[in-house]
Image (cartoon, rainbow, N blue to C red):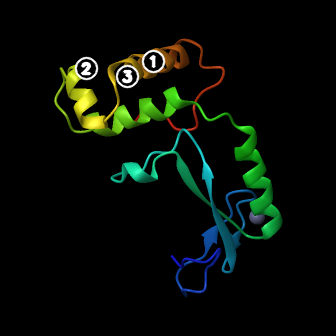
Amino acid sequence: MADSDSVGDSGGPPELCDWCGRTWRNGVLALVRDSSAVHAHDPGKDGKRLIVACSALHLAQLQEEYRQRPFINEELWAWQIVRALTGVATGATVDLIAFATGLIVPQIHRAIAWRNEQLLHPSDPPNNEAQ
Ligand SMILES: [Zn+2]
């Protein structure tokens, strides 16, 4: 994608607006803070979500929605743990998780407690489910 905030002139297939779902060819995009977003391979991009919209108005509405959503560190850490453990055999220790994620042990315990609380009280589920 281009470095600018305008996208869609590549001639590829149309994309969908994250706000209204319409297809567009000349949309706009932005990065927003989102504790449910972890990058597949680059921890430096964790906590940031790329949003795309068909218009500046819909982009602004999306940005406001993400501004209203609390950024929950425990949620981010939980997803970082999920990423680190993907493909790892069962029986990972806290020390292994700490090594793989760069988190410290208290952060891991808080992330696990947060995730357990989400599983027990799913009335406010995270945006993404465990993979
Ligand atoms: Zn739209």
**Which x, y percent locates residue 89?**
16, 30
Q: Secondary structure at mark 3?
A: helix
The answer to whether the residues at label 3 and label 1 have Cβ atoms under 8 Å apart is yes
Disc 3 to disc 1, how far (Cα)?
5 Å
Q: Secondary structure at mark 2?
A: helix
The residue carrying mark 1 is 110
Residue drawn at (59%, 14%) of the image: 121
The residue carrying mark 2 is 94
Q: Is residue 8 left or right of residue 46?
A: right
The residue carrying mark 3 is 108
Q: Quadrant of ligand 1?
A: bottom right
Tell me the quadrant of the picture where the C terminus can be found. top left
The answer to whether the residues at label 3 and label 2 have Cβ atoms under 8 Å apart is yes
Q: Secondary structure at mark 1?
A: helix
**What is the residue that sits farthest to the right in this orientation?**
57
Q: Is residue 74 above or below residue 27?
A: above
**Amino acid marked by disc 2:** Val
Q: Is residue 50 above or below residue 3?
A: above
Crowd around label 2: few <14 · some 14–19 · many ≥20 (10 Å): some
